[in-house]
Image (spheres, rainbow, N blue to C red):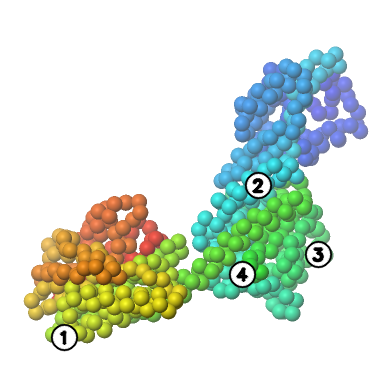
Amino acid sequence: MEAADPARDPEGVDLGDDVVPALRALLTDSVVGLAVWDTDLRCVWANDALERYDGIPREQRLGRRPRDSLAGDADRLETLVRWVLESGHCVTDRDYRVPAAGKRRDRALSSSFVRLHDAAGRPLGVCMMMLVVTDRRWTGDRLTVVSEAGARIGTTLDVTRTAQELADYTVPLIADFATVDLTEAMRLGEEPLDRMGPSRGRIPKFRRAGRASIHAGAPESLWSSGEVVYVPETSPFTQVLSTGRPLLEPLLDTARDTWLAEDPARAAKIRAYGMHSLLILPVHARGMLLGVAVFVRTSNPTPFDESDQLLAEELVARAALSLDNARRYTRERNTALALQRSLLPRRIHGGTAMEVAARYLPADAEGSVGGDWFDVIGLPGGRLALVVGDVVGHGVTAAATMGRLRTAIRTLADLDLPPGELLTRLDRTFIRLTEDDEAADTEIPSMGATCVYAVYDPAVRKCTLALAGHPPPAVVHPDRGVSFPDLPHGTPLGLGMLTFPTAELDLAAGSLLALFSDGLVEDRHQDIDVGLRRVGRALSQRAASLDDLCTAVIGTLPTTAPADDVTLLLARGL
């Protein structure tokens, strides 16, 4: 069976001028994907629509068997084609799943197969017809789609990533192009709008938070992620913002006298990519407007309908709750970070005893701000107290507890107590504060803390220190060798079980003392010894200053967004 001319029937009879345009339209303009295989299961004919659906050019399809000319589970489809050819029975409405590059879900198509005959009834081959699945895909599969969305959207407490996950999930599942634009308040963790009422007189600022397309790089988008989005005063977007209701435009009106006349850049993109159907949904949660989600169809010829809108609304509603949780978390994290930074020393001075430098790196958005702190306190006789501590937990409560402990240590340091006795009294103070909080039924929960308190005496170059469940410091010797002294750890603060023994270290001239929190050396994927060796290697390197050495040590972290706070305090005797 040779490749056929669509202007002739299988017997080679001229079908006439009136029929020719219709047959040629099947090849170039049909919305139905068509392909024909002969009795040897070789593809002899295919139209353009089929390429639009599964991405396989006609040249790569002709002359090949179904398993080599179809996407997805092509072996199963070849078995189906052979069965239709041998049995003569038709097969209708079979799933044809096309893998979508970079997407988690395949594109769902419906395929049907029928055997072709000549005038004498002899088999000529098999014809496959393919259409985009519309309403049927959301009936039996709806719960699966929405359930999967719960696992794919909102995997973090990052606003931008959640918006991008929504866009990624809906392309090509629902749309060929999707964007998610959020109010500026979302990015800053502030209170969003209830809606943009008509009396407000101005359009709020939106930023592109997510975009996805069937085309690599989303060339349809006028704005990159993070950029401010222009919203025309008269447009479907402002209509959705002001009413808080979805807008479904199955057939997008691109006439020049519409709102697009005020937005030529967007109009040019619509024409260039053949955008023909539009769905805009408000992104709102707990009665507040967070942004808008826009869905567009280009290559998919089927217009949006009510079933598409219903599914999109469910997906956007799920995403909106995750976005609002992320916004609330961002606000709390910003508050905790501001509180913590206000409680940490802005400058540290070692006086005539030591040269000091410190670094504090807050946890990423997953772990929230923790309760790390550091301090350098001048003592009588030219001595210097060095402190690093870590409150268990994260958020505002951890930062508030950290502030109370730092204040208590400074008060106790004025008494010039030995390190072990100071930590013992700090432990008792911490327990009393916790009991008072519980009696007052405050929102600050009881939590433990760890701490290292060291006192350096430059006159004898000795350092006395005590640990309350905290990692011991590192000592960098004059020859650049690094050691982690084996010191009694003591128990964390808040237990009131034991006293805290004091240890003593001799520091030769030029030695360096490094106090740090566990966030610098601990990693959930590695043993702590790996972190200690990493920090030891970094401390052994030469640096122009202690500030540069701090930067070098922090730079060895496995990630720039640690799950726990990281604190480092370096001190070198003068």
The residue under label 1 is which amino acid type?
A: Pro
Q: Amino acid at mark 3?
A: Thr
Residue 350 place in picture, x, y as percent = 21, 79
Check residue 143 in the rendering and tell me which mark sits there, or answer none.
Answer: 2
Q: Nearer the viewer, residue 335 or 113?
A: 335
Mark earlier in primary sequence (1, 4): 4
- Circle 1 is placed at which residue position? 380
Residue 359 shown left or right of residue 229 in the figure: left
Instruction: Answer with left or right where residue 489 lies relative to residue 91.
Output: left
Q: Is residue 331 above or below residue 38?
A: below
Quadrant where the C terminus sits is: bottom left
Task: Label 4, secondary structure: give it.
Answer: strand
Q: CA distance from mark 1 to mark 3?
A: 79 Å
Q: Foreground residue, 453 or 206?
A: 453
x, y percent for residue 91: 75, 27
Looking at the rendered image, the disc whose residue lies closer to the viewer, 1 or 3, is 1
